[in-house]
Image (spheres, rainbow, N blue to C red):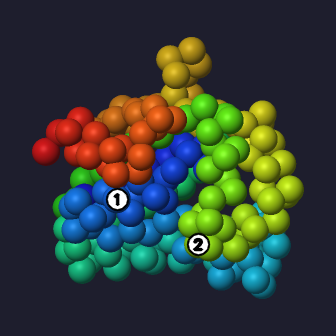
Amino acid sequence: MDFVVIFGPPAVGKMTVGEELCKLTGFKLFHNHMAVEPVLGIFPFGSPPFGRLVNEFRRRVIEEAADAALPGLVFTYVWGLELPEDTELIGSYVDIVRSRGGRTRFVELYADLDERLERNTTELRLDRKPSKRDLEFSRANLLEFDRDYVMNTDGSRRTCAQDLIERHDHVRIDNTRLTPAETAALILRRMPQ
């Protein structure tokens, strides 16, 4: 199974690009909010039960997808590249796939802040991610993540995540001015087969 991890900052287009990539490849999409939203109805974001449940659900879905020999699974994630715990988590998912004979590919998206702030309010995002419907909170959260975390590689600062990323195929795409379909097509052109 191909395990495609699309990462980047909030509202960069991970889910919509993932959907388009799945249309082109026949892969299945497992966007992060598929695990987050059900748990948010019971436990607050960041609480220990929230973290345990979301991470266990993600892990089990990835295990089952790899065991079922799906051709591919596209997973989306806002990855704090400087956080060892985030890299350890993603590494554990990579290990699941590798232990079943699969391979991992990393797709890194980045876009201008103004564009991401606009995307943060799109109808599709709000429909698929109910926790983003409080636009004031969602905007503040996006800005807070930009201030507090490293979510893209840029060559200016090495992070602990780069050791993991560099062991696998990796494409980095500025999708500020690209549609999700254009971005997905570019991923396929740039990704080694």
Q: Which circle's residue, 2 or 1, is located before the other in the chain? A: 1
- Circle 2 sits on which residue? 128
- Disc 2 secondary structure class: helix
Image point 33% across, 44% down: which residue?
Answer: 182
Q: Identity of the amino acid at label 2?
A: Arg
- The answer to which of 114 and 174 lies nearer the viewer is 114
* Residue 184 screen position, x and y as percent: 32, 49
- Residue 105 in the image: state x and y as whole percent: 31, 47
Count of number-bearing discs: 2
In the image, what residue type sits under mark 1? Glu
Q: Which mark is residue 85?
A: none
Could you tell me which quadrant the N terminus lies in?
bottom left
Describe residue 112's horizontal placement relative to residue 155 as left or right. Answer: right
Q: Position of residue 122 (x, y in %)?
A: 63, 59
Q: Residues within 10 Å of mark 2 (few under 14, many from 20)?
A: some
Which one is in front, 168 or 179?
179
Compare residues 148 and 27 and report the one nearer the observer.
27
Q: Is residue 13 above or below residue 31?
A: above
Q: Residue at x 74, y 47 (%)?
A: 142
Locate residue 152: give its quadrant.
top right
| Residue bearing mark 1 | 20
| Vertical comparison of 46 with 160: above or below | below
Identity of the residue drawn at 58% across and 72% down: 128
Residue lying furthest left: 193
